[in-house]
Image (cartoon, rainbow, N blue to C red):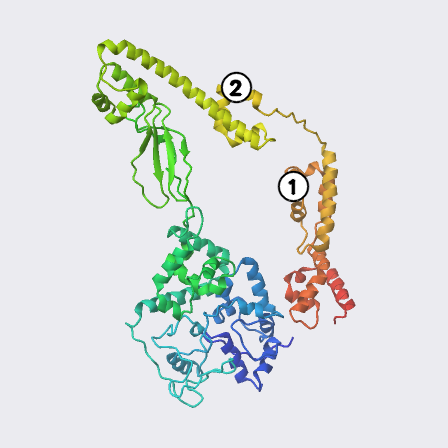
Amino acid sequence: MNKLLYFPSPYPDEDFKSIIYRYHARGSNQNLSTSMVELFEKKSEKQTVLPTKIEIFFNKLPIGHNYYLEDFMREHTWAGVLRSFLSVDMQIVFEESIRYGLKNSFWLGQLIPINLFSKTTMYCPECLLEDFDSFGECYVHKKHQLNVMDVCYKHPVRLIDRCVECNIKLSNANSYTFLRVPKCSNGHKQKSSFINENEDEQDREIKTKLFNMICLFNEESSQMNSTFIKWKIQMGLWDKKFIHYKGRILKKELVETFSSSYGAKLLEELNLRNLSSKWFRTKILKENFSINLIFYCLLIILLFGDYKSFKSFNKPITNPIPFGNGPWKCNNKICENFNENVIKNIKRLPKVSGGEVISGEFRCPYCGEIYLKRWHPNKKINKKVMIKAKGEEWTHRVLELYLKGFPATRIAKELNCSKSGVVSNLKRVFGEYKRLEDNNRVAAKQIVQSYLESASAKAIEVKIQEYRSSIISLMEANPNITRTELRREIPYVYLWLTRNDKEWFENILPHVKKVSKKRYSRSSIDKELYEKICIHIDKLKENHPRQVKKSTIIKQLPPKFQNRFKSNPNAFPLSKKLIERNIESIDDYLLRRLPHFVTQVLKANYKNVTLKSLQNYSALFKRCNPKTEILIQEYLKNKGFE
């Protein structure tokens, strides 16, 4: 591979295409295609947004150059911003495509958003004059080629692609030629068109934020990937209430807010159309972020304000616990534990509709009062509770005061409740309500005693029948269910029947299965483990793409065997020796995968495969010993390579 004798030094913010054109313009080649062969070994005059075969180009740079590939790509191309919005796996493929090129370059073109870069080469008239004064020639600025800005990032001047005098194009449409002097081909100097500072001030501010964000994504692409960006956007959506508490993104509401925030005029200028279509909504936060890169950058601005806030934002997506953490207070003023946190359990009531409001039922274990509360994840609902049942303590107090001769009005005042509630309770006991006379007091006491006894017995009987029915229904639906599974499904019912209806419960429960544990000796386990390892080692040596290490072999085993071996490897000497014997060194790995590496080097458009080209492709070949190098050279010679 011949080294270049000369290559021009890049200027600040110079587009990569401009650097290549200046090399060609200063050289003796008549056609740009000849210069492209010299630099990239590819016959094409057309220069694209994403350069390819950059590794070949860097290997040809003059001896002693001080360029670093990563810095060069960041400062003179927009590859970084596209890389930022790819998954980690796709980033590897993306970088290899740029380094070594692809037979099918169409794949790279699919990653470039149609609305991100200008279709023609853009210039700032002020920058043209400044560059000519400073460097003696003009060049193309990389940042001027972003389609999101129609104004220079340094001067309040509109960018141009045609002569302001004769309207002729300043550069060839296919990027064959660029301006080297601040004049068009007809000799007209380019005049600046200054913008009105008050015109579309809000839109210009948004465009500036968008421009700065794209530049920062390009500069910090090594810290970015689509998973990280998606994770941050989801946190922002959750913080701004665009994610339902069940986890569904409210895409329709999001798009409506997005469109109203930026306005139809700005979105039209940025080529963001049909945002309200169902097709577009289904694509939000799906794969291939880079296609809608401008949309996601604007969404980040909407959610976070700027790049710095986006990067530092860290509010996890967590649902608030309905009604908070227990225990909860008893609201019954006649209860001895009034206003104390004594309610340890809450019963979530089923919802008929699919709304967001959740209802909970709270029962005090001391006074028996049951009250209901409602909760919404995003709204504050009136904290007033709804009483479902006043409880046994209240009923007893009502009857006690009634037997003392208190009228319903006074009972209600004593117990801090309504008169109608007191009357209703007394009617349930006596069948009617009337003030208690002295001659009826003995009969009333007998009625109350009978009611309390029957109510208690009836409540227990109802509960027994209810819980028995639950157990029987579950067992009929799952004939093979075990006791453990039954207890896991309805733990409260299981424990209550165990304590209060044990005889019936034991008769109906599935029989306990006595499992006899089969004992294994360590030697038998070691032999079984040895056989499994042998099978996996053969498979690994056939097609494993990476170096076979100790952990590689162990990971192929079932979890049970992995745990046994990791906890005490010395207990399995046969397996331990087998694993240690089959750990690959770097030399063994390179020899095993040598056919694969040769194929990859050929795909990278190397005409001849040598030890040197293999070392350029993978640094591992630089670490192999002399004996391995000889074996590699013999293999290449047998395959017909020089």
Residue 439 drawn at (x, y percent): 23, 9
Which quarter shows the N terminus? bottom right
Name the residue beneath numbered marker 2.
502
Which quarter shows the C terminus? bottom right
Q: Amino acid at mark 2?
A: Lys
Q: Is residue 367 above or below residue 44?
A: above
Residue 564, image quadrant: top right
Residue 313 appears in the figure = no
Instruction: Locate residue 429 relative to residue 217 in the image: left or right.
Output: left
Name the residue beneath numbered marker 1.
562
Considering every residue shown, the one lying at the far front of the view is 431
Task: Describe the element under mark 2 as helix, strand or loop.
Answer: helix
Residue closest to the eye, 451 or 414: 451
Considering every residue shown, the one lying at the far right of the view is 638
Residue 486, image quadrant: top right
Task: Describe the element under mark 1 as helix, strand or loop.
Answer: helix
